[in-house]
Amino acid sequence: MPKDRLSVVVTRRLPAEVETRLSELFDVRLRDSDDAMSRAEIVEAMKTADVLVPTITDTIDAAMIGQSGDRLKLIANYGAGVDNIDVATARQRGILVSNTPGVLTEDTADMTMGLILAVTRRMPEGLAAMQSGTWDGWTPTAFLGGRIAGRRLGILGMGRIGRAVAKRAAAFGMQVHYHNRRRLRPEVEDELQATWWESLDQMVARMDVLSVNCPHTPSTFHLMNARRLKLMKPDAVLVNTSRGEVVDENALTRMLRAGEIAGAGLDVYEGGTQVNPRLRELQNVVLLPHMGSATRESRVEMGEKVIINIKTFDDGHRPPDQVVPSML
């Protein structure tokens, strides 16, 4: 007699091909709209489902996990980060957590380079002039930005995305430097043409561009705080495509307004969708709506990883992308 299919609840709309495959394999409950589930709706789903598929915008904290039923056995996060989930509490309750690592690497690295170019070459200002119809022709001194070839790029966090950024930056002629919890192996450093800094403070003070590519954990919250931001050179640029919480957004805004930092390119924000309104007023800032991984290819590949994690679990094995507290 065939066993019952796993009950799976998905909190947001996913690409059509992913939803179709989920429906073929599992007893899945999909969202009719792309609105986020409320906290109460997620708790109800956790009481009745075997598997919950949240996204990075769904907070699954200890209190919610404590209300989950005995049936919930897997939280298969649709996203590489898991800072939205209390992994330790889930583990204590016997609930596995998985994510979708590696899928977003190339797309996020592309967007990081895009932001570096957009800020240093003042692309938004040029776009605004064209869209407003105020441009009246080329002049030798208009919209002068800076050449990135030869500039020092400091990468904060040399994981998959940081390394992908390093490769792109080297192709643009930038000098690659990095700070990481652990130094890379010599052969990897040689391949990336990257210089390691044991002291983050010393690296920050000497870079022309700083790219934030580390995850948000308790130890990286406000890693770029007011004190450390003040170490940056006045003509330096900060780019963040990782997590907003790593940077003290209020301190960054004050320094940008005061001209103490030349510019910033941000795809993520400390308050999620609640972006500091003062940031929106600044010409030396490029703001994007968390679209670093927003390609059709990555969204489908993320869904495929979610499906593999659930199917492997259903077959009685450990999900290949299982996350445990010691990894965080």
Image (spheres, rainbow, N blue to C red):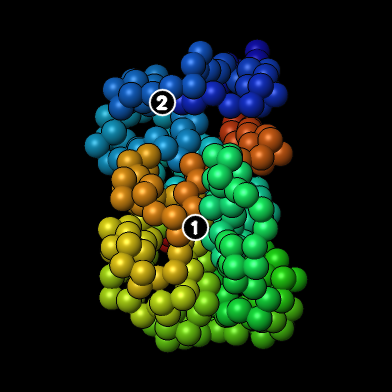
Residue pointed to by mark 1: 265
Residue pointed to by mark 2: 36
Q: How many numbered callouts?
A: 2
1 vs 48, left or right, is right
Tag 1 or tag 2, which sits nearer the N-term? 2
Question: At 33% across and 24% down in the image, what residue appears?
Answer: 38
For residue 11, above or below residue 172: above
Q: In which quarter of the image is the C terminus?
A: bottom left
In the displayed orientation, state which residue is furthest to the front.
Answer: 136
The x, y position of residue 225, in whole percent, is 31, 68
Judged from the image, the secondary structure of the residue bearing numbered disc 1 is strand
The x, y position of residue 257, in whole percent, is 32, 62
Amino acid tagged 1 = Gly
Question: At 48% across and 84% down in the image, what residue appears?
Answer: 206
184 vs 82, left or right, is right
Q: Which of 164 and 210 lies nearest the eye of the viewer?
A: 210
For residue 276, above or below residue 312: below
For residue 243, above or below residue 203: above
**Neighbours of disc 2 within 10 Å: few (<14), some (14-19), many (20+):** some
Kindly indicate the quadrant of the structure image that contains residue 293. Answer: top right
The x, y position of residue 305, in whole percent, is 64, 40
Q: Which of 293 and 128 lies nearest the eye of the viewer?
A: 128
Does residue 267 appear in the picture of this structure?
A: yes
